[in-house]
Amino acid sequence: MKKSLIILIIINFLLAFIIINHISYANTEVDDIKQSPIRTIYFGNRVTIDEDKENLYFIFGNQIYKYSLKDNTRTAIYTIPSDLINLQTSSKNGVIYAYEQTTDSETGNSNCKIYKYNVITNEALPTVTINASEHIGNDTFSNLVIDNNGYMYFRYGASSGSLISFDKNGNYIDRIENSNQETYAKSYGVSYDDKLIFFVLPNMAGTSGYIKINNGKFVEHKLMLNDIGQNWRYSDDGTYAIDHLGNVVKFTYDSSDLGSKYEVLFYTGKGLIDYNSAGVFDGHYLYALGENNVFFKYNLDTRKVEGRYKLQTTTLQDKEIYDFKVSNGKLYIVLTEHNGFDSYYYIVTKDLETNIEAVQTINVSTHKALTRSKQDIIDRAKMAQHMFNYDTNIYEEEPNYTGAPYVAGKLKEQVVQDTLNQLNFYRWLTGLNEVSLNTEYMERSQKGAVIQARLDELTHTPSRPTDMDNDWYNEAYAGVNAGNDYSGNVAYGVRIDKTPIGFILDTNNETANSVGHRSSMLDPRSNKTSFGYCNRYSAMSMYTTNEDLGNNDVWYSWPSPGYFPVEDMDTSMMWSIQLNGEYTYYPGANDLELILTSGDNKKYEITLEQLYFDSYYNNFYFRIPTELLNYLTDGENNFKQGKKVTIDFNGLIDSQYNNVNIHYTTEFIESIEKPAYTLGDVNADGTINTLDSILILQHIAHKITLTETQKLAADTSKDGTINTLDSIKILQYMAHKITEF
């Protein structure tokens, strides 16, 4: 009776298990995956055998296991004659090298034994023993790398490490001793032509280098080459490789130089980390794992992604991608699921012909800025106009920059609000989120302005005045510099509320061919700002965040799509197109095409040599051809209302490797009703003469007060402030020293 009851309980349990599992996956879209038939103790060291594309190899204890991707089975193929549980491993040309270092109880000598097993021919090769004590004393061998001759390269040393080499029989060849200036922590493989060893530097993430070798001897040591990778994985002919950074590279070999040269073809966005392979070469194609768990098919000849496949979220639930292989038209993806020391392995098999989806070409012409009417922009521009009378004192607390004790000072509330309103108008105009005031760091920015005024120098790296407290100086330095989550911008001679547009126009960077200040002001990642002003010097920071700020457009440009105010343009500025972080381009940029079409239907191509790129801000920028600029301005100094230009930016890619083309039109409008005036003719008598200069000086001395229209005519320096410089410019104009303002 009890036996029957137990059987019945078991049957009911199994039925419940089946039902529960059926319910769990009912109506849920999942990949067709095969779970390993048994729960397996977690495999130990995994050994990569590139020559065998249908199997994975592991060493657990002293057993070498072969794990079949096709049959989803695990088989012990060789027992290593060692009692050590944690053997170190490496591989080359189908041979697994497992090694251990032990101490002889009688002699006290340390010996390193290297066990070899050829998985291609299924045979054990002779064991090699190296007297470690003789060569490295009490140190330990690690990070074995083997070249095509069977020469072995070990790292030794407790932390930073040195390298030593032996032939295939264990005979000593050469070594490089560690020094404080030339340190390396881990070697990651030998180049296809046996001319280089790659390694990574200690305590310097992403920094690596190489050592030239010649028949086991170390020839030359190169350090701190950030674009050299470790753990290279090569194509069969050694022409292509993929490195730890996720770069796909093409090699040219030069035997006379004992080395290789290469060019980066593509960036996968996912580097090799320990045993996690990122790419498999198969003929003229690379199959690689990119960002967001997207597998893609990359044509090595055309240098383009042709197809992709993304694992479904339900498939990856509680699992991680462990490895993948390509064999006979199939993509085998290995997933693992851990439960303590126990693991399940899963195989997802995809047909490369039917399951790999072709990439699409996406044409993008929608943008938030296109929803704004002319009247929207006119109304918003009016709201952003300054409310404060800048002929009066702008400080709530006066700064002191002349000497100790230094005082940061504080701007009046309306001055702060005017500046914030101006900045947010331009961000709104571009289609970006507004930013708020970072009240915590307003004093820091104010100190940044003060130290510039003290030194009378526009600088991001001010020296410390001898009479300035060190803590005060550090704050001031941070106020003009940049940090991990904020930028630093400095300016001179521009009224504080006019600094945002000054940075955005960025005409002072003309010779540097850069729009770094603009990129900072219009950074889609920014949510706060702080700024300060002292004696015509200003400092302004933008603070970034990982929060979703709602900036989901593909691009943000200056000038932006749709209607755009002529008042916010400058004939000497560069134009820019800043991409959302999900978008980029192929290295080499051979497919990039930027075409500008004027309103009278003339086309102008911006060549790759004329197109600049800032990788930090993902921002492209360029100069307008002279003929197009003449059309937009009628050959004058200002852009004209009603003029249009259409931009076609083709050849970009998104995070799913689709081809992306951007198309938009900008039409210039007047957003501010300006009173009629002539710059320099302050009294509006039709002549620019000394009387106009005198009126400016009388206004500065508070003898008279100019009207708003007269102030516009008097601002000959165009800095938003009426001062002696404006008077001087009128005198220079009269003396024919300058011909225009």
Image (cartoon, rainbow, N blue to C red):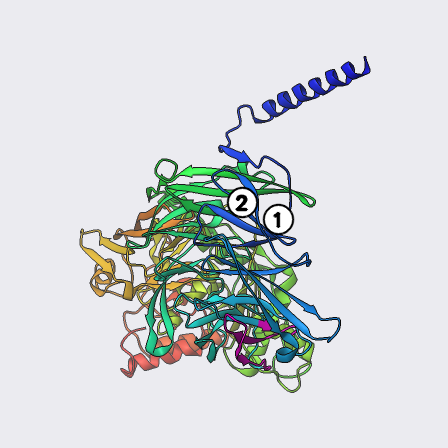
Q: Which residues are magenta?
A: 155-180
Does residue 380 appear in the picture of this structure? yes
Task: Please state if 449 lies on the left or on the right of 638 as rendered.
Answer: right
Distance, label 1 to label 2, CA atoms, is 10 Å
Q: Is mark 1 in CB contact (under 8 Å) with mark 2?
A: yes
| Nearest to N terminus: mark 1 or mark 2 | 1
Q: Residue at x 27, y 82 (%)?
A: 736
Classify residue 544 by image quadrant.
bottom right
Task: Please state if 630 lies on the left or on the right of 714 as rendered.
Answer: left
- Check residue 162 for magenta coloring: yes
Expressed as whole percent of the image width and height from the top left, the position of residue 144 reads 55, 66
Q: Which mark is residue 67?
A: 2
Expressed as whole percent of the image width and height from the top left, the position of residue 586 reads 35, 56
Quadrant in which the N terminus appears: top right
Q: Looking at the image, which is closer to me, 664 or 692?
A: 664
Task: Please state if 131 lies on the left or on the right of 297 as rendered.
Answer: right
Q: Which mark is residue 43?
A: 1
